[in-house]
Amino acid sequence: MSTDPSPDFGSVDRLELPHHSFEAEAQQLDAADALAPHRDAFVGSDSSLIYFDGNSLGRPPRATAERLARFVTEEWGGRLIRGWDEAWMELPFVIGDRIGALALGAASGQTVIGDSTTVLLYKMLRAALDAQTARDPERVEIVVGRDDFPTDRYLVEGIAAERGARVVWIDVDTTRGVDADLLRAAVGPRTAVVLLSHVSYRSGFLADGAELTAVAHRAGALVLWDLCHSAGSVPVELDAWGADLAVGCTYKYLNGGPGSPAFAYVAARHHAALTQPVQGWMGAADVFSMGPQYRPAEGMRRFLSGTPPVLAMIAMQDTLDLLDDAGIGAVRAKSVALTEFAVRVADGILSPLGVRLASPRDAAERGGHVTLSHPAMRAVTARLWKGDVIPDYRDPHGLRIGLSPLSTSFSETLTGMRAVAEAVRAES
Amino acid sequence: MSTDPSPDFGSVDRLELPHHSFEAEAQQLDAADALAPHRDAFVGSDSSLIYFDGNSLGRPPRATAERLARFVTEEWGGRLIRGWDEAWMELPFVIGDRIGALALGAASGQTVIGDSTTVLLYKMLRAALDAQTARDPERVEIVVGRDDFPTDRYLVEGIAAERGARVVWIDVDTTRGVDADLLRAAVGPRTAVVLLSHVSYRSGFLADGAELTAVAHRAGALVLWDLCHSAGSVPVELDAWGADLAVGCTYKYLNGGPGSPAFAYVAARHHAALTQPVQGWMGAADVFSMGPQYRPAEGMRRFLSGTPPVLAMIAMQDTLDLLDDAGIGAVRAKSVALTEFAVRVADGILSPLGVRLASPRDAAERGGHVTLSHPAMRAVTARLWKGDVIPDYRDPHGLRIGLSPLSTSFSETLTGMRAVAEAVRAES
């Protein structure tokens, strides 16, 4: 705690009563939460640690340790190379379809588990850009938000440099994200592809998928959606939006484990026209003919490159089971209730300390996390971690409160946010 | 079995005596094998199944199920996002260095675990080609063997098309691979990069790493070694060869599990000059500054792209422990003894059936597998699989006998090859 007497201290003391009412509210919300039993399915749900970072690395379901051990002994060890013919060759498509159905609004045959998010974004951006410029050599612009996740920006920069394309940056308010007006001003007859974040990694701003897709399409552009911060917490409706391509993480709300492989979606209408540059055996038309020339496979297989990361895609299936049971609608409803509660608690006990909400206030424009801004937040984060309260920090001054709906309770949220208040007081 | 009386049948019957002497020999070799106890470390070593495909997917060590389960509960579940700071950010380099020291003859700081083999080969080929053409615009040729693994050929084709480079194909005898004479005839002042297989996936031909690297260097070319079929069974001496770049599999002799991520090596002298095109946050100089522009990190980090596949690189550590204990020299000595024995058994009981050795006869030119050719081998493979004898099949007519040194015994080899003889008789 700072030795300076804090001018906000008195106002915090006066908030003791609201503290108590928040507690009652948290208990009521937990009691009414139909998804509350699912929280017990996660490792650590019985510990006192407060986890506000399930939007960065989701907790493991308890079933996952046993699922992986069984996979090693029975499938890998028991079936050995026969596992490829019997199940694993199709596993990227089977799990992809499951994610598509449960979380993405994607009919089967359009979603696949592939490489890392970064590599899949590279392949999808190249596929879209190269097809567009082949069709119309004037379409050489890639549109991306200047506040998007570094990988998205770095990839676009690199691809523009190597392909002779041009980057069109959209400047955004860092407490929001790219909306229809901003996008409309950025696209035009030279736009090849637009890379959009469905939920902003920084602010949690939730973009309107249908509207932004329509804006891009009216300009003749293809849209690649980055779903990293929405898949598994916010309903995505790729088919209904008319989306072209999408890529998303599985280690956040889908709890696939550290560095688990990403998924990619390509709308069926584009399968014949799009190809990607990393031409490996798993993307070839006949994998085991090993013929003299690369001919891309039909359908989603053409977007694969190397041997599918089977061991790395085993874990995420436990969360898909939970999601199948809960339904993405109920998950979103709880997510909204969690972030609404977090905003109310922030207004009550953090706003008096000078903490500012750096996320949209309207739940309809907000994904699964809430970002709180204060000049001391870097130090606050370090202090919280020492006390087993684990949020994430993002420049500038942003404390991200990630509230993974299946594994987070309202009481945990309140306890954690009280710890944030204490830490802010101590570091101010 | 064919209903035609086989002309070879009589000669096989006359081989009953050698069968018995092979059995005695197998028992003697097993008894003298200092690495024999290591075989018990693998799942399935106590089963009657014969596994001849550890060069495609290695057996899991018994310790791996428990290691993965513990990782899920204690590290992922217990440390959560803190795991990245505490260990996981460095894990690609820690495990990479271990592979480098134990199997590749690579000093630390030059080997990293990254993406799939295919993606890493793409990135390394692009890094080498782009640097060479930037230095000398005349260097636009990529040299590759026409009999190399499909991924290698497909990647080279694709990169040549997108970068305006030219492929120079080396035609080889499919029972051998690229040697110094063939390479010398293919390289010249226009060669940018040579992609070479250390051990041929088809024939098992073992290339002379030092000599071929020198041939390429004399022409001013960079060499990218594909180590998929050698890493963990054949000593590799990347630093001593003066190699430039290398990529290899971890799911074969390193038993990392189906689709486990590959490793890449870049000689330290090239780190400053080479960059790769898949610019993600993990390759940036300051990962968490998330600044406006991509600046590649120093050292091997610049060859990373996305979030490291941590869960997928856990399993391979068990085999690294075994390799650390056994030493790659002893592993190679057993590998040579196994393939020598297999060749003798093939000469004794398979040659009379019309089966031809499609691998080098000289052990100094042979890696860890032996390929046997016969027109019926596709059907033979299917028949063997039904009887729990698991080799691999590769066109044309090739039965691959993979003899993973740590997990294969001489008696298992003999039993399996007798089953091959029976199956060839049945399918001829």
Image: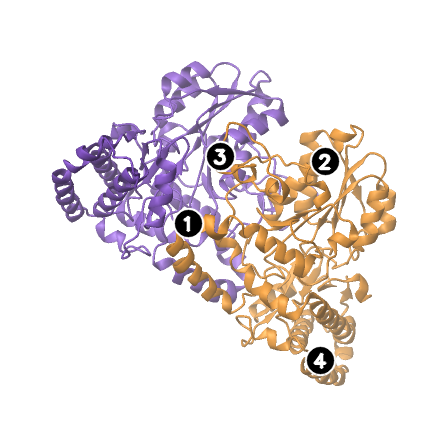
Chain colours: A purple, B orange
Mark 3 lies on residue: B289
Q: Which mark is residue A419?
A: none
Determine the secondary structure under disc 1: helix
Cα distance, mark 1 to mark 3? 17 Å
**Separation of disc 2 and disc 3 at Cα?**
30 Å
Kindly identify the amino acid type of the residue bearing the numbered disc 2.
Leu
In terms of secondary structure, where does tag 2 sit?
helix
B252 or B78, which lies in front?
A: B78
| Residue B29, numbered circle | 4
How much space separates mark 4 and mark 3, taking CA atoms?
A: 58 Å
Q: Can residue A291 be seen?
A: no
Residue depicted at 71% across the width and 38% down the height = B128
The image position of residue B223, as x and y in percent, is 76, 45
Tag 4 and tag 3 share a subunit: yes
Q: Which residue is mark 1?
A: B82
Q: Is residue A227 visible?
A: yes
Label 2 Cα neighbours within 10 Å, binned few <14 / some 14-19 / many ≥20:
many
CB atoms of marks 1 and 4 within 8 Å = no
First of labels 1, 3 by sequence position: 1
User: Which comes sooner in the sequence, label 4 or label 2?
Assistant: 4
Q: Quadrant of the N terminus of chain A?
A: top left
Q: Do callouts 4 and 2 point to residues on the same chain?
A: yes
Tell me the subunit letter for badge 3: B
Task: State whether residue A328 is above or below residue A211.
Answer: below
Q: Locate residue A392 relative to residue B380 in the image: left or right.
A: left
Three-letter code for the amino acid on which mark 4 is drawn: Leu
Q: Are marks 4 and 2 in contact (CB under 8 Å)?
A: no
Q: Are marks 2 and 1 in contact (CB under 8 Å)?
A: no
Which of the numbered marks, if any, corresponds to residue B129?
A: 2
> Please, is residue B25 above or below residue B169 in the view?
below
